[in-house]
Amino acid sequence: MILVLFFVVLILFLFAKYISQRPKNFPPGPPSYPLIGGILSLPESDVHLAQEDWAHQYGHLVGVMTGPSAMLFIHGTPYVQEALKKAEFQGRPRTVDITERSYGKNLGIFFAEGRRWQVSRKFTVKFNRSFGIENMENILQLEMDELVQKLSGSSERGHVYEVKELFSELAVNTMWTILSGQRCTTQDKRIKVLLDNLSLAFRSGRPGAGAMTMLLTVIPQLRRFHTGIQTQRKGTYLLQEFFRESIRAHQATLDAANPRDFYDAFLIEAQNARNTGVDTDMWTEEDLITISLDIFSASYESVNSTICFTLLYMILYPDVQTKLQQELDQQLGSTRPTLADKQRLHYVQAVIHEVFRINTIAPIVAPHRCTEDTTFQNYFIPKDTVIFMSIWSLLHDKQIWQEPSKFKPERFLDTERKFDLKNVQLNFINFGLGK
């Protein structure tokens, strides 16, 4: 009996060790342990900073095994730029987190693949062009007018606002007006609950890379005991139902000759697909809900955080604020700036880009997946490896940006104090290239 038990334990140990074994010529990385691999080495936050430490220890490509699954962390300007353009790295991981938000299917824009991703992206780009920058700017101007009025009134009454809430409402209303033609406020409990959850998930700085996240991915049954995930799941459901309600209201009042917004445009394309029999499975209600979730989650957090951090840097660097105001006064006088004035506002553009650079809203690109066995930088990368690329490493590269930890808008100006577009095109990547 003891001998049998010994052999069973031995076989289980060897099996666990085998499935956690590093593939031949896979990039170096933290040590792997039987069954769990290198899960315990994964950081729960600030993945981009952990990647920088790993780059010094293991190199710019770091491989981590999580049980039978492989993860690749890429750090450094030339390596990230090459990886973002590599065709085999354009897949999206099929984790529980991602499939749950898209009804267990390959839906949306951010995490879709293949033909469906092409169709969704093409439609979104087409809508943006037809809807027009001018229409979007008009919506934004209305929101800005209301924000200014609110701030002006609050100063007279001595009222204090939470800055994040002010700009959250601006971001939400701008995107919701474009999507549905309607305004809403963050006082709507359904949308506020979910946006708070989306904000928490986005700000974590670990898009599916933390030890706990990976453990829950490897053993999804544990998710039911994780209160944070249950709260986020509930929030996602609430927003999905919020979108569904608006979409069905649009269906009931749709006039194909007079599209009002993004939802109308999508529903018209869905009708055309049914009439022609082409790509009919790509224009479903679930598709539109998931696309809405993609657009809302990304735009809400990025817009809100960027504006808040811009205000913060203006407070911390009053000399920059003074220069910025001087340029606005010299170029525009008392008139309000529009997108048409962009080419004249060189210092304003420099300040905006420096805020993007130093703060790096999304330090890690949304996770990618290797779609087939391939090689990269002479290393073997197996199919289905989940890939994390550090945009932060590009925007804080000491070989490109002098004193990258300092806030210096002048780095984006040329010798004539003009906005240096060439420098931006060569070295500035904010949210990623490729898919």
Image: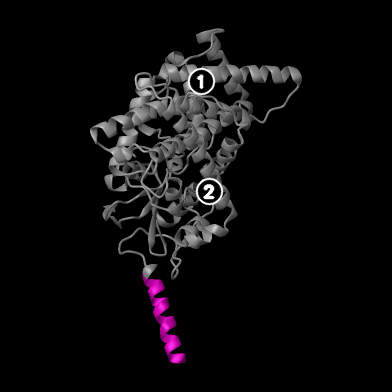
Residue at the spot of label 1: 140
Does 422 appear above or below 397? above
Q: Earlier in the sequence, mark 1 or mark 2?
A: 1
Say which mark, if any, is on residue 398. none
The percent position of residue 322, horizontal first and vertical second, equals: 60, 18
Residue at the spot of label 2: 233
Does 372 appear above or below 271? below
Q: Kindly report the distance in space between the C-alpha atoms of the residues bearing marks 1 and 2.
A: 31 Å
Residue found farthest to the front: 252
Q: Residues in magenta?
A: 1-18
The amino acid sitting under disc 1 is Leu
| Disc 1 packing (10 Å; few <14; some 14–19; many ≥20) | some
Total of numbered circles in the picture?
2
Residue visible at 56% across and 19% down in the picture: 144
The percent position of residue 376, horizontal first and vertical second, equals: 29, 51
The percent position of residue 30, horizontal first and vertical second, equals: 44, 61
The percent position of residue 285, horizontal first and vertical second, equals: 40, 38
Q: Nearer the viewer, mark 1 or mark 2?
A: 2
Which secondary structure class fits the magenta region best?
Answer: helix
Does 44 appear above or below 276? below
Q: Secondary structure at mark 1?
A: helix
Q: Is residue 64 visible?
A: yes
Residue visible at 56% across and 13% down in the picture: 326
